[in-house]
Image: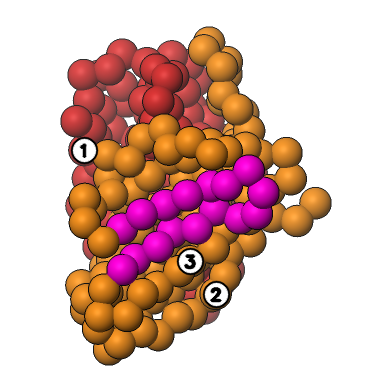
Amino acid sequence: NAGVMQNPRHLVRRRGQEARLRCSPMKGHSHVYWYRQLPEEGLKFMVYLQKENIIDESGMPKERFSAEFPKEGPSILRIQQVVRGDSAAYFCASSPPRTSGSVLPAGELFFGEGSRLTVL
Amino acid sequence: AQTVTQSQPEMSVQEAETVTLSCTYDTSESNYYLFWYKQPPSRQMILVIRQEAYKQQNATENRFSVNFQKAAKSFSLKISDSQLGDTAMYFCAFMKPYSGAGSYQLTFGKGTKLSVIP
């Protein structure tokens, strides 16, 4: 059973270009989360998506950043007109649906290996 | 909003010795989940151990155990018989109970860099 797959692992962009990061969740998982890790920092929540729906984007910058999780294909985090401050590792995580009152099994949130974005 | 604080940016331990990593958090919730994640140089985030706040018993996973002090809002990780493969960044994380949207949102500390010395 393949884990969460992210690509590319490394991406270099010049200021003003666009960056697209892809995430394929684990088989059977319909929920995707994107986190950003700045240098010397912990991961910070950006956005939570289910198939074709953005559920919570409270951690995502209002401008230049967007995310989608189409019915078919991977989830995509898109950063337009990148700036040096966007340089970071971007992690995707996936999970099965969670229901009210359910006990959270160990390791239910599965992380990918991350995509490292470098903006020159 | 929840906050998670790891006050030890870096630590080192001799191989086979025991080390304890500290974590404190702040929340108004009464029921929640706490986690320790390991991030080795490969940068993969690996779940080490988790604790449900409603459980008084401290969680253990092989050489890893926690000391959960709910009243003090403290959640430390003890690694026994340290091994070279334990060298990594360790992140403490907090998750709120289920409340609908964003229910899997984790709040992370800044991490502790652990080096195991041969």
Q: Can residue B64 be seen in this view?
A: no
User: Residue B70 vs residue A108: left or right?
Assistant: left
Mark number for residue B85?
none
The residue at the point 27 percent across, 45 percent down is A59
Neighbourhood count class around disc 1 (C-alpha, 10 Å): few under 14, some 14–19, many 20 upward: few
Give the amino acid at mark 2. Pro
The residue at the point 47 percent across, 45 percent down is A33
Chain letter for mark 3 = A
Q: Mark 3 points at which residue?
A: A21
Please identify which colour was used for chain B in the image: red
Mark number for residue B3?
1
Q: Name the residue under label 2.
A: A8
Neighbourhood count class around disc 3 (C-alpha, 10 Å): few under 14, some 14–19, many 20 upward: many
Q: Which of the two marks, 1 or 2, is nearer to us in this view?
A: 2
Give SS at disc 2: loop
In depth, the one of A61 and A107 nearer the eye is: A61
Instruction: Let me know if residue A70 is in the magenta part.
Output: yes
The answer to the question of whether label 2 and label 3 lie on touching residues, with beta carbons closer than 8 A, is yes
Chain painted in orange in the figure:
A
Q: Distance between the residues labelled 1 and 2?
A: 31 Å
Instruction: Let me know if residue A30 is in the magenta part.
Output: no
Q: What stretch is highlighted in magenta?
A: A65-80
Q: How is the image coloured?
A: by chain
